[in-house]
Amino acid sequence: MKMEKDWLLRCLGTLAVIVTISGNIPQIIKIYKTKKTEDISTSGLVLKMIGKIMMLIYACYFHLWELFAPHIISFLLTTIILVQKFYYKETQNNFIPLDHQDMRL
């Protein structure tokens, strides 16, 4: 019974890791397609990254290697979103919209 319970909890933990990590992927794709990031909180992303760093330290200290890899991946995905935020903000600031009158021949 205990072995069956342990297996079930490990499956639940693995599923939680997959869901948590894959949660960032739709956001990355949407940002890439729309090139819009103004509604994403920079402070929220930074806090998320700090939390991941603390979890990495915790996992290393207690040798919880099953937590280490998912938090590295999640940290990298959050970093991608943060880089997209600054990159697209910079490119949007350099965009000069054309007036309809400027398009006349």
Image: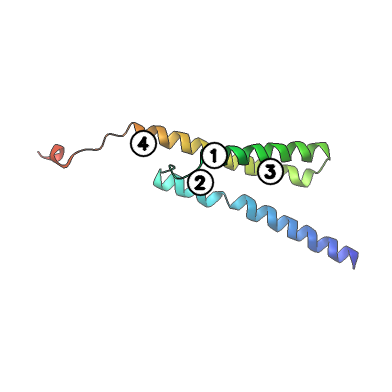
What's under tag 4, amino acid-wise? Gln
- Residue hosting label 1: 80
What's under tag 2, amino acid-wise? Ile
Query: Where's the C terminus, which quadrant?
Result: top left
The residue lying furthest to the bottom in this view is: 1
Question: Is residue 46 toward the left or the right of residue 6 in the image?
Answer: left
Task: Please tell me which residue is depicted at 46% across the width and 34% down the height of the picture.
Answer: 86
Task: Please tell me which residue is depicted at 90% across the width and 64% down the height of the picture.
Answer: 2
- Residue hosting label 3: 71
Marks 1/3 in contact by CB < 8 Å: the verdict is no
User: Which of label 4 and label 2 is nearer to you?
Assistant: 4
Pointer 1 or 4: first along the chain: 1
Secondary structure of residue under mark 1: helix
Looking at the picture, does residue 13 appear above or below residue 48?
Answer: below
- Residue hosting label 4: 92
Percent across and percent down for residue 8 are 79, 63
What's under tag 1, amino acid-wise? Ile
Pointer 2 or 1: first along the chain: 2
- Residue hosting label 2: 28
Question: Is residue 79 toward the left or the right of residue 85 in the image?
Answer: right
Q: CA distance from mark 2 to mark 1?
A: 7 Å
Task: Please tell me which residue is depicted at 40% across the width and 47% down the height of the picture.
Answer: 34
Looking at the picture, does residue 49 appear above or below residue 4?
Answer: above
